[in-house]
Image (tube, helix red, strand yellow):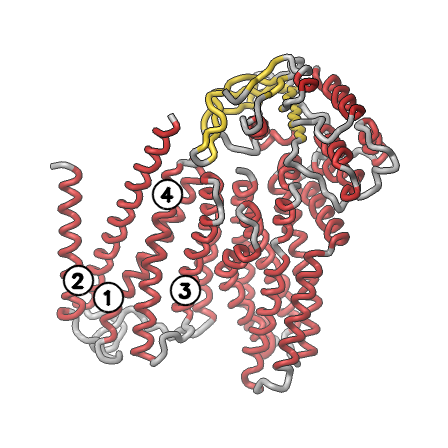
């Protein structure tokens, strides 16, 4: 079986998986208590989106460090691809989080530290692309963007871990169940984990596509030179 | 030929920065005037009488750091941007070790920011009626915050100087990195207004100190990459 | 102390899709001044930048060798003296303050008298050494630039259009400088001036 055929099968499987996740989120998982109406179901989409935006940030860091070590243009393309997808998923996480906040607490924005963390991650991604846009020279662009990504990565743990300890958070514990105790109800946990796998699969698929395109463009440029 | 250390070279860069700045006064004017103007505007509009007693620690702490932060943004990028603008960057790149350049310019930014804090914080206390109970912990917090803010600003300034050098880009890159720092500084300042105990400020002090350390260490690794193509 | 030479092999540089240099190989060594010539935009300054290590090559390698041992890249700056049109000295400082700064950066403990003497050898009048560089003519600034390039007696000297902005007397000063460093430094001059080209023992012609 060719690589293309194998990839095709995985893509169809991913599509079917996500359909199951959506079905499970609305029909299989029970209603959570302590939340307004069915609003808690957004957790099956919001949490994986936030997870993927952080995963993309990590991939961006890995590719950035590789670029700084090897100066391979493909590593710079990988870093940019991860950042683009991170920006997308971070935006989705912010939007779904705001929708939940509106239903639950009556306001789209509550200045909760977790909300602030995800928005700052969004600002970091936006700043990363603003920096890339400002530099014409490819090698310099790759190096400076990689340096900024590394700097942002070492600063982020303070936002995610230290700041919430200083401030009270409105953010619900992610472990919610029908009875309102801290253990997550098994059916909800299954759907959440399935959704995490599905969204990660979507990220890997889109990332692979972007890297393939970058590889073709770099090869074409090299052929043009020789 | 005598042997020079990284420290002596960094001090040479620092001394050159001080001499240049005292002659041109561009950064001093930008930071000082921006800080004072903003402070006067805030004090005039809000003053010590407009804020309810229970809101004072929160609001006064936040306003103070907003003023310091934006004053810092207006001038701290000059250490690198002016080198590229004046075409002295290449001359410096060829003459000095990268870490000597970084060390000297970081020291300059620390001194500049410390001077700004020394000017603004007492003035702010007087004009806005900010009563600090934990003075010693606040001074330590100001010092740690100065190092953290200056180290972040210096490395970001090095990045943008090699890009377009614009002040807007500096703000865009620096704000997301400095927001966690600002949150911790505001929290610590608020504590200092209500409690004299070191223990109450400890989380903020630890956070700011750790962030300063992490930024300095990251800068040591990243600056040579940024400085040289 | 063993002399320093620079070897470069299959050196290439492109900016975006524009290829400026390709497949360049050669060597810089003492007693053999290399003149780099070519029309405007042919890559003369780019080649010097690559040899100085301020630019990374797109392909090929540059190596500094002391005797037969390679010098690590982070030590190149201590061996190098460069003067180029895209470099400047600090205009708010005096000529002497500039030179003192660059000397200190290189770990030199020269007195002001010694530094002033060097500036004098390069044609700067003694009354001018304590004036801010901002008040200088372009020729005088060029002399300060050359002074910072040679204050540490470099083992490698790269000069990009050294006589630009200089009068006849200045040209003679550069000729004396080249003569002085010919035997002790690996020297390259990027130029289109026939008189400067004549100083070269070997020539690298770019642009074809």
Which element carries disc 3, helix, strand or loop? helix
Task: Say which residue appears at 78% left-offset and 21% top-offset.
Answer: C172
Q: Earlier in the sequence, mark 3 or mark 1?
A: 1
Q: Nearer the viewer, residue B150 or B88?
A: B88
Compute the Cα span from label 3 to label 4.
Answer: 24 Å
- Residue C95 % position (x, y): 79, 39
Q: Earlier in the sequence, mark 4 or mark 2?
A: 2
Query: Is B175 displayed left or right of C30 in the figure?
Result: left
Residue indicated by mark 4? A77
Q: Earlier in the sequence, mark 2 or mark 1?
A: 2
- Residue B182 % position (x, y): 53, 66
Mark 3 on the same chain as mark 1 = yes
Residue indicated by mark 2? A21
Q: Nearer the viewer, residue B126 or C31?
A: C31
Crowding near the residue tagged with mark 1, few <14, some 14–19, many ≥20 C-alpha atoms within 10 Å: many
Mark 4 on the same chain as mark 1 = yes
């Amino acid at each position: 079986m060719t690589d293309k055929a194998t990839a095709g099968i995985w893509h169809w499987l991913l599509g079917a998986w996500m359909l199951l996740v959506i079905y499970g989120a609305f029909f299989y998982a029970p209603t959570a208590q302590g939340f307004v109406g069915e609003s808690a179901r957004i957790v099956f989409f919001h949490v994986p989106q936030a997870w993927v935006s952080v995963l993309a940030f990590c991939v961006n860091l890995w590719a950035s460090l590789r670029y700084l070590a090897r100066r391979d243009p493909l590593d710079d393309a990988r870093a940019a691809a991860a950042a683009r997808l991170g920006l997308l998923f971070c935006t989705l996480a912010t939007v779904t989080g705001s929708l939940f906040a509106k239903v639950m607490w009556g306001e789209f924005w509550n200045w909760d530290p977790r909300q602030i963390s995800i928005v700052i991650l969004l600002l970091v991604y936006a700043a990363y692309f603003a920096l890339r846009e400002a530099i014409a020279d490819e090698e310099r662009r790759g190096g400076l963007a990689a340096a900024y990504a590394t700097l942002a990565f070492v600063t982020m743990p303070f936002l995610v871990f230290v700041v919430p300890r200083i401030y009270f958070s409105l953010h619900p514990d992610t472990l919610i169940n029908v009875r309102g105790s801290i253990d997550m109800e098994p059916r909800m946990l299954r759907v959440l984990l399935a959704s995490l796998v599905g969204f990660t699969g979507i990220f890997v698929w889109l990332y692979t596509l972007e890297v393939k395109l970058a590889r073709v463009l770099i090869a074409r440029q090299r052929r043009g030179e020789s | 030929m005598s042997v020079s250390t990284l420290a002596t070279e960094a001090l040479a860069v620092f001394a050159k920065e001080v001499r240049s700045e005292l002659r041109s006064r561009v950064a001093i004017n930008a930071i000082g005037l921006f800080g004072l103007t903003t402070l006067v505007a805030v004090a005039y509009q809000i003053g010590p009488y407009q804020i309810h007693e229970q809101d004072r620690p929160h609001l006064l702490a936040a306003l103070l750091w907003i003023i310091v932060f934006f004053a810092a943004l207006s001038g701290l990028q000059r250490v690198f941007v002016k080198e590229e603008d004046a075409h002295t960057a290449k001359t410096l790149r060829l003459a000095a070790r990268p870490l000597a350049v970084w060390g000297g310019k970081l020291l300059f930014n620390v001194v500049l920011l410390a001077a700004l804090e020394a000017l603004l914080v007492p003035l702010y206390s007087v004009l806005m009626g900010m009563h600090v109970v934990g003075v010693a912990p606040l001074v330590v917090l100001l010092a740690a915050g100065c190092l953290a803010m200056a180290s972040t600003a210096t490395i970001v300034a090095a990045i943008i100087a090699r890009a377009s050098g614009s002040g807007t880009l500096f703000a865009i890159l620096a704000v997301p990195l400095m927001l966690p720092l600002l949150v911790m500084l505001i929290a610590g300042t608020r504590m200092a207004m209500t409690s004299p105990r070191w223990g109450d400020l400890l989380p903020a002090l630890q956070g700011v100190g750790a962030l300063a350390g992490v930024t300095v260490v990251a800068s040591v690794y990243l600056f040579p990459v940024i400085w040289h193509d | 102390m063993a002399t320093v030479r620079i070897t470069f092999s299959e050196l290439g540089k492109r900016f975006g899709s524009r290829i400026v240099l390709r497949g360049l190989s050669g060597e810089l060594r003492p007693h053999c001044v290399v003149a780099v010539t070519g029309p405007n935009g042919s890559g003369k300054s780019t080649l010097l930048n690559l040899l100085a290590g301020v630019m990374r090559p797109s392909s090929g390698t540059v190596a500094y060798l002391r005797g037969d041992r390679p010098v690590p890249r982070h030590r190149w700056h201590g061996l190098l003296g460069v003067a180029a049109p895209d470099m400047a000295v600090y205009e708010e400082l005096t000529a002497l303050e500039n030179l003192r700064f660059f000397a200190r950066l290189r770990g030199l403990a020269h007195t002001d008298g010694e530094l002033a003497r060097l500036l004098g050898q390069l044609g700067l009048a003694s009354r001018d050494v304590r004036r801010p560089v901002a008040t200088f003519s372009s020729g005088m600034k060029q002399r300060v630039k050359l002074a910072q390039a040679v204050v540490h007696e470099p083992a490698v000297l790269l000069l990009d259009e050294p006589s630009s902005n200089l009068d006849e007397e200045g040209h003679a000063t550069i000729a004396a400088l080249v003569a002085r460093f010919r035997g002790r430094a690996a020297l390259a001059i990027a130029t289109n001036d026939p008189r400067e080209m004549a100083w070269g023992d070997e020539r690298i012609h770019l642009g074809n």
